[in-house]
Amino acid sequence: MDKERIGVCPIESDAIVRYMLRIAAKRGVLHEGAKECGRGLLPYLPSNYLPDICFEHPLAKEVSPRIALVLDPYDAHYLRYASDGAWPNDAPAPTIPEPTHWNQYVGIVATPDGVHAFTHVADAQAGDVCLAQGLLSSAPEHVAEPLRQLASLPVFMHVRKDEGRFELVVLLQRAGMQERFANNPHRAEFVDLLRRLGADEARLSALDKVSGMFGVPYYSSAHGYQEHVVLLDVSHFSFAWEGADLVEARAGIIASDKVMGYARRSFKPVIAYQWHITDECDQRCKHCYLFGEDARMACVTTPWDQLVSTLDQIEERCALAHAYPMLALSGGDPILHPRFWDFAELLHKRGISWTVMGNPFHLNADVCRGLRQLGCFQYQMSLDGLEAFHDRLRKPGSYQATLAALEPLQEAGIKTQLMATASRQNLDDILACMDVAASRGVDSFAFARYCATSPQKARELYPTPQEYRAFLLSYWDKRQAYERGGCKTTFKTKDHLFTLLRWELGEFVVPAWSKARPDRVRGGCHLGAKVTICSNGDLLACRRMPSKVGNVRFDKIIDVERGDGIRRFAQVDGIKGCKDCELLMWCRGCRAVGYNATGDLQAADPMCWKQATEA
C-alpha cells in the first residue's frame, strides 16, 4: 500500500512530539525530567501517524515524571494501513502488545527507570455508579465530601484501595473539539474540588495555559508553510492517599491530533455508514423502498468475504480522513444474516462502534446481552403509529412486539430509538407515539418522511406543504414541552425542514460567519456527501432514491466518494425553489422526496411551504 497516500501526518510524528513538549514546558506544565523521558519514547513513534501522547503535571508533591504513548483498537488498524500491515514492534525494546477489545488501551510508558509496555482495560465508571458501589465508605474522611460533589459532575472515576493506600483517578468526559478544560462550564467547580483534595493553587492555574489547539509549523513543497493542528488538554486527575496523608497528586495532559484526547468516549470525527447486509426480513411493509413496485423480488444477502473486504475499505477511507467509522447495520433485519454474530465479533475485535436498525421479533434477554457485549450501543425499531395503523402498515402483532423488545434492550444497556415514517396517513399517530416513547423511557424518538416509490403514491400519500408545516409545529411544541418537563426521551428533529420552521420562529439565525462563504454547504440534506452500502454491494448516493454510483465489488469506497459520479448528486446551486433561498446551505429539504415524485433530481421539496408560498 502506498504510504504517501495512506499517511495522515504531514510531518514526522517525533517532530510533532518534540514541538508539543516545548509548548508544554513554556506553559509550565512539563515535569522536570519529562523531556528526557520523552526522548526515550521517540524511537517507538510511527513515522506518519501520531498516537496520543500523555504526560503528567504534578499538582502537589513532587512525583516521578511519566510520559506514555497510548494506542487503542482504532489506532491498531490505522497503523496497519500506514505500515503495510505490520504492527510497530521493531523498536529497540519492549514489544508493544496489540489491543484486542474496544475498551483496551496499550502502549509504552517512559519513566526515569526506563521504558515499559503496558496494557490497560478502561473500567472507569460514572461517578454516581462509583458512589453506589461504596466509594465514600472506603475514602479518607476528609475526602468523602469533595468526592460526593465530583460524582455529580460529568466525570468518570476509578478507585483502587490496597491496604492503607487509597487511589482515585478522575477522567474528564468530553463532547467535542470546542469543549476543553479551559472553557469547560464546570471548570470552576473542578478547580475548587481539586483544591480541597490537596492540589496546589499555582499548579492548578497553569492548566488553563495548556488547554487549547496549537499549530505545529512545517513546510510542504506543494503548499508552502502549513500547520499541523494538535490539541493539548487536561485528560484526567489522579490522587493517592496513605491514611489521611496525600502522597501523590497529578494532572494528565494529552497531546493529540485527533478531535479529543485520552479517556475518550466519542473521539475523532466520525464517518457514519448505513450498511444493508441482508434483505431478509420478517415483514413486507407497505411503504418499503426495497420491495416497492416489485423493485427487488428476491432477497440478497452479502457474502462473508464481501463483508470483510468492505469493512477493510471503510477503515481505509476513515484512516485517510483521520476519522472513526460508525456503522448502522440494517436490512431487511440484519440479525437474519446467517453470519451476523460472526460479523458482530469482528466489529468488536476491531473496536468499531455500531448500531442496529432492525425488527423486534428475534430479541430476547440473551440476544440483547450478546449484542451489548459485542459493542452494539443502540437498537432502532420502527413505530409508525398506534397499534391499528402500525400493524396494518407492517404486520399483525408488530406493535406489541416492538414495545415488548424495549425492556430486554434497556436491561442490557443498549440505547433504544423508535423511528416513524411520516405520511399523510399517520401524522396524528406520530404525535401520539411521542407519548408512548416518553412513557416507555425510550432514549430517542425520530421520524423521517415517507419517500414515494412512484409518482402516483406521492400524490396519494404526501401531505400538502401547509399540512406538513402544521404537523412539524405540533411536534416542535410537544418536544419543547417534554424538554421543559425533564423528559428522558430525546425527540429528534431529523427533517431538514425543521431548519425552515426554526428560522420562522426565530430559533435559528443564519450565522454571520457563514455568509462570508455562501457557496459552502453547512447543514441540511447531505445527498452526495457519502454512500449507503447495499446488500448486493451497490453504493448509493441516497438509499431512498435510484442513485447508484458504484459497487464495492469493483470500486473502492474512497474513490467513489471522491469521484465525479457522486458529485452530480451533491450539486446544490440548481435546486428549484432552493437556489435563491437564504437557507440554501442549511436546509434544501429532502431531495429524494422531490425526485421520487417527479423524476427530476433538481426538483423542489414538495412539502416546503416557503417555496410553495413564493412560487
Image: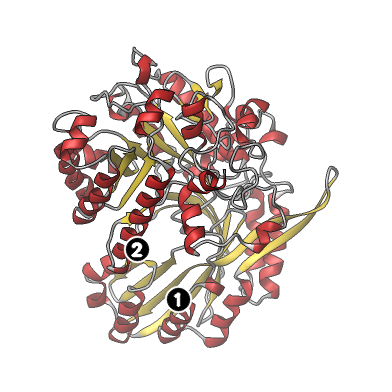
Name the residue rendered at 37%, 17% in the picture.
293
Q: Which of 295 and 40 is in front in this view?
A: 295
Q: Residue at x 32, y 51 (%)?
A: 444
Residue 73: x %, y % from top left: 47, 43
| 55 w.r.t. 608: above or below | below
What quarter of the picture does the N terminus occupy?
A: top right
Q: Where is residue 566 in the image (x, y as percent from the top left)?
A: 61, 29
Distance CA(mark 2)–CA(mark 1): 25 Å
Res 480 label = 2
Residues 212 and 378: in front is: 378
In this view, the residue in front, 117 or 104, is 104
Picture layout, residue 414 above or below residue 391: below
- Element on which disc 2 rests: helix
Give amino acid for label 2.
Answer: Gln
Asked where in the image residue 459 lies, by quadrant, the reply is top left
The answer to whether 356 appears left or right of 262 in the picture is left
Amino acid type, label 1: His
Q: In which quarter of the image is the C terminus?
A: top right
Q: How far across and down, in percent of the image, does residue 180 sit?
A: 54, 68
**Circle 1: element type:** loop
Q: Residue at x 53, y 46 (%)?
A: 524
Instruction: Say if residue 300 shows up in the picture.
Output: no
Q: How crowded is mark 1: few (under 14 residues within 10 Å), some or many (20 or more)?
A: few
Question: Is residue 377 shown left or right of residue 429?
Answer: right
Mark 2 residue crowding within 10 angstroms, few (<14) / some (14–19) / many (20+): few
Q: Which comes before the other along the chain, label 2 or label 1?
A: 1
The residue where tag 1 is placed is 186
Residue 508 in the image, given as x and y percentages of width and height: 52, 61
Q: Do the residues labelled 2 and 1 touch (CB within 8 Å)?
A: no
